[in-house]
Image (cartoon, helix red, strand yellow):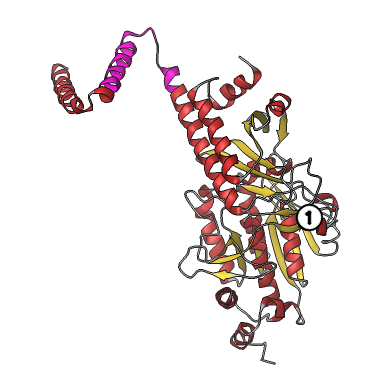
Amino acid sequence: MADQGTGSAALIEALQLTPGDLAARALQPVDVAIIDSGIDATHPDLVGRVAISIRIEDGQVTELDAPGNNDTYGHGTGVASIVARIAPNARLIDLRVLRPGNKGSGDDLLAGLRLAVRARHPVINMSLASPTKFVPQLIPLCERAYYQDQMIIAARRNMPISDEGFPAEFASVLGVDNGDLPQPIALRYHPRRVIELEAPGDAIPVAALNGGYTTLSGTSFAAPMVSGVCALLLGAFPALRPYEVRAILCAYGLRG
Amino acid sequence: MSGFDSLLQRYLSIPSNSEAENTLRLLIRMGLMVTGADEGSLLVLDDTSGDLLFAMTIGDETSEAALRGQRVPLGQGITGLAAATLEVQIGAPTYKDVRQSVRQDGAASGPTAVMAAPMMIGERLVGVITAISFARDKHFTTQDGKLFGGFAAIAGVLVDQGRRLARLDETTDPTDPADLARGQIATSIARIAQVRPDALAEIATQLASIERLVAGGA
């Protein structure tokens, strides 16, 4: 077995594997922050998987005494269930920034990302896009995350008009589009696109509120596929740096 | 004016039986056709309450009467999620068992696939359009979402234009001789553009001469 103490040895070994191989290895726990509508930690698929539940409302941060049902929409629960399914070693950090009556203002989303960066969670999943006006604040935050060895995985807009979605467009962030790919974790790499990676995102079976299941489609559900693979890679090879993880994902994507 | 008409007028500045209303209806109908949906609706955002209100349904006349004016809180369902995230949302009903959700063979009487797209003016939400299907095994793809989102984007532009025109109307006094003259000039030029577009260059030259005269006189 290669020396896992150095990133380059881990990189070489990881490049020879597939996402499926990774799941079968001994994995260290990896924190995956889910910045979304919250997570229903009482769902059978998520019981024991959510380490921390936090609500951010108008900039106020409240940590729940214990993870419970922290989701009213089901979007974050669906996203979290994908990460949990792909990466058995993922410890989910629930950062709820979307609540009833909140019309995607973006302030709370920014506050959630700030919190995740400050806490140095190694993987941060953002299946929500920010309004353009927050771009000047998002750029340095995402840069800081990159230099702190954190990976932000963000979904492309489902319906891009003037932009592909922020922060998905940034070079410091791994942007993910939805591709017509086999489930659960095939990837496709497009070296010349702003959004380089595609993952499956059509009719994805996910956990729903009240203990049920549903199928959801869109880039929101492709991004957690990649977040899950990142958690597997970092669990198997903790010495990997974000740019190495990115290179491995791209290699997986070229293989199809 | 019916309740439905007043909802479109009140929240989107679209008068009843107007070209804008018909175009909006046509847009949603086309959105349903290209995505293979059975029914659709338009909900307008009530900024005061933060709720969405059903203002128009397409595909089933009986549901329009039943749904018109009904409120959907922003925190509810896929429609509320599209409004909150300002993103197209694509989903299906919830099942109790994951295998059932994969097969999608729930009761045919209920919806099998749902989709909601925000209607925006810039980055501001004005409403949501929805599409539903009752067909067995149907699910909307992200490509469907992009198409439907495109129709929502055009609908947003239509609403924006309607509002701008309404604002223009508000600032124009129909009894003011100057406004009347402005209206006459605009109507004449529009008529000439239709029947004698070749004459427009000459008119522009003459108007420029008049403008110079007026400026000189001042």
Compared across the picture, whether A60 is left or right of B191 comes to: right
Q: Nearer the viewer, residue A224 or A133?
A: A224
Magenta-drawn stretch contains B171: yes
Residue at x 57% of width, y 53% of height: B143
Q: Position of residue A231 (x, y in %)?
A: 69, 72
Q: Position of residue B115 (x, y in %)?
A: 66, 45
Q: Is residue A133 above or below residue A250?
A: above
From where the camera sits, is residue A41 visible? no
Q: Is residue A48 above or below residue B32?
A: below
Q: Chain of mark 1?
A: B
Which image quadrant for residue A114?
bottom right
Question: In this picture, which residue range is highlighted in magenta?
Answer: B167-192
Q: Is residue A183 above or below residue B66?
A: below
Residue at x 60% of width, y 62% of height: A180
The residue indicated by pointer 1 is: B101
Q: Position of residue A219 (x, y in %)?
A: 61, 57
Compared across the picture, whether B70 is left or right of A164 comes to: right
Q: Is residue A36 above or below residue B114?
A: below
From where the camera sits, is residue A132 visible? yes
The amino acid on which the numbered mark 1 sits, given as a three-letter code, is Ser
Q: Secondary structure at mark 1?
A: helix
